[in-house]
Image (cartoon, grey):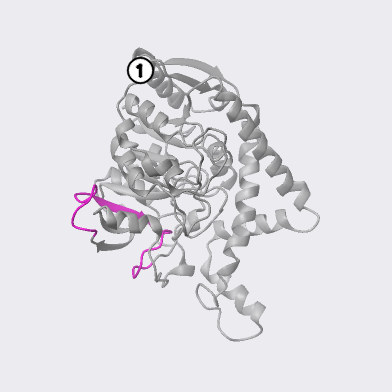
């Protein structure tokens, strides 16, 4: 089947021996691969070939994995359906008339179709969990700082994390074991003291990913686990999604888990806060794509501003232009306090709400996506509805927490994902609960 899951197909061999020596991996095309072009799904970078590997790619090679291609994606990660790619949309292998989700749609589709055993995506507001849910695979968004971002082409630095996708929870967790850990090239990889106080130390051995074995946590033992159901995120969700989600919760209860209802007042404002912050950071990050430092040339006629404008007009798609303009507006003089500062205040509120919720529950649960996968072409004319589709996933990124999407079942023949959210560096807890859902 031709899903258009890859922008560039290649073969990058890893070491002869390692935990992933028998695995093939698709790498999202915003993660740098030495000598293999990295386009970010954009015409702006159609000829860009990085001179170095991202840290996660180095880890894949050391673990023996074979990289089989650079996965298609929404342009610069901006989209939720993988339809904004300059290289054409990706089809959902479950039903090719539907979108695979995004922005890591190529990564999820490749795994679901068996074109790769595992994949790496990046998650800024749900971009690993969304396509995992829509394609019926497992996707993990790690705690901010667990995995190095060195070599990831930045969209919104304070929100995004590289995360694994796999057919099973154990497979995805095994890939997380390989890529997690401190990185001297990335100051956002944290050095937690281990004392539960959030203090930091400068010793690599104290980083949560150094000694962890996330794959070993996939033992399915949820006896005595308390699952908090975020009721705010069930309102307005598709009835078929809610029904499948509730059936998965019943299954967890039958295995010894307890469920409690949890309300997070702040999530009502999370989508608005997320898009102000993400677009503001994007407008700054994408300034480097001017046809001189990076990107297609705007030519040499006229003044520099004209060349700069031509390069960006030709190189960027409509969704990227929209987000740059909105982000620049939010950061402009006179509007910074009205929008960006308020969004950061809302972000702090979201974090506090999650902290309070984890005093009552070990993990939190929601449907990953409030809707079933839309049909191809259905969402592009209504960007606002596309943004609102992220309501269940963006609060996690605002709070820098870990979350996993695991298949919960199907509705009308289309996959439905269950999202489990953990406290900071609580990856083992969400992996364990997700493996029980399987």
Q: Is the magenta stretch mostly helix, strand or loop?
A: loop
Picture quadrant where residue 321 is located:
bottom right
In this picture, is 222 found above or below 87? above
Where does the magenta region start and end? 14-37
Q: Say whether residue 202 is magenta.
A: no
Q: Is residue 92 visible?
A: no
Q: Is residue 282 visible?
A: yes
Q: Which residue is drawn at 65% across and 48% down?
A: 276
Q: How crowded is mark 1: few (under 14 residues within 10 Å), some or many (20 or more)?
A: some
Where is residue 182 drawn, in percent x and y?
A: 44, 50
Residue situated furthest bottom in the rendering: 301
Quadrant for the C terminus in the image: top left
In this picture, is 232 found above or below 126? above
Q: How many labels does the image show?
A: 1
Of residues 208 and 22, the one drawn nearer to the viewer in this rendering: 208
Of residues 184 and 52, the one drawn nearer to the viewer in this rendering: 184
Picture quadrant where residue 385 is located:
top right
Where is residue 188 drawn, in percent x and y?
A: 53, 51
In the rendered image, which residue does mark 1 sit on?
Answer: 251
Give the side of residue 380 with respect to residue 210, left or right: right
Q: Residue at x 61, y 55 (%)?
A: 281
Of residues 36 and 57, the one drawn nearer to the viewer in this rendering: 57
Where is residue 245 drawn, in percent x and y?
A: 42, 24
Of residues 337 and 98, the one drawn nearer to the viewer in this rendering: 337
Q: Residue at x 28, y 57 (%)?
A: 61
Where is residue 181 drawn, in percent x and y?
A: 41, 48
């Amino acid at each position: 089947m031709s899903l258009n899951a890859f922008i560039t197909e290649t073969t990058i061999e890893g070491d002869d021996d390692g935990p992933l020596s028998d695995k093939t991996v698709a790498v999202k095309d915003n993660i740098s691969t030495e000598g293999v072009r990295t386009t970010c799904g954009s015409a702006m970078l159609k000829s860009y070939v990085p001179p170095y590997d991202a840290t996660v790619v180095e880890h894949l090679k050391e673990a023996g994995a074979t990289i089989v291609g650079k996965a298609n994606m929404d342009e610069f990660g901006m989209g939720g359906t993988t339809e904004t790619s300059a290289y054409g949309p990706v089809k959902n292998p479950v039903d090719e008339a539907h979108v695979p989700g995004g922005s890591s749609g190529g990564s999820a589709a490749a795994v679901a179709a068996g074109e790769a055993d595992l994949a790496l995506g990046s998650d800024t507001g749900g971009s690993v969990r969304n396509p995992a849910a829509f394609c019926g695979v497992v996707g993990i968004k790690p705690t901010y700082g667990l995995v190095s971002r060195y070599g990831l082409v930045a969209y919104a630095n304070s929100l995004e994390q590289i995360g694994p996708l796999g057919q099973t929870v154990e497979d995805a967790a095994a890939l997380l074991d390989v890529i997690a850990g401190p990185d001297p090239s990335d100051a956002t990889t944290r050095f937690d003291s281990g004392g539960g106080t959030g203090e930091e130390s400068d010793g690599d051995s104290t980083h949560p990913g150094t000694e962890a074995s996330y794959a070993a946590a996939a033992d399915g033992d949820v006896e005595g686990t308390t699952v908090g159901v975020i009721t705010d995120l069930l309102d307005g969700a598709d009835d078929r999604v809610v029904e499948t989600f509730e059936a998965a919760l019943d299954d967890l209860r039958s295995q010894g888990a307890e469920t409690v209802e949890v309300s997070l007042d702040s999530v009502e404002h999370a989508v608005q806060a997320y898009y102000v912050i993400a677009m503001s950071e994007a407008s700054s990050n994408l300034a480097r794509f001017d046809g001189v430092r990076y990107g297609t040339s705007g030519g040499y006629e006229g003044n520099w501003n004209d060349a700069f404008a031509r390069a960006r007009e030709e190189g960027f798609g409509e969704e990227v232009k929209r987000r740059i303009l909105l982000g620049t507006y939010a950061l402009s003089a006179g509007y910074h306090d009205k929008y960006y500062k308020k969004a950061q205040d809302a972000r702090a509120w979201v974090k506090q709400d999650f902290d309070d919720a984890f005093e009552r529950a070990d993990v939190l649960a929601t449907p990953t996506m409030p809707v079933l996968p839309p049909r191809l072409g259905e969402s592009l004319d209504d960007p606002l509805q596309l943004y609102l589709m992220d309501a269940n996933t963006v609060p996690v990124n605002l709070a820098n927490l870990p979350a996993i999407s695991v298949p919960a079942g199907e509705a009308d023949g289309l996959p439905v994902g269950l999202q489990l959210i953990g406290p900071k560096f609580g990856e083992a807890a969400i992996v364990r609960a997700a493996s029980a859902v399987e």
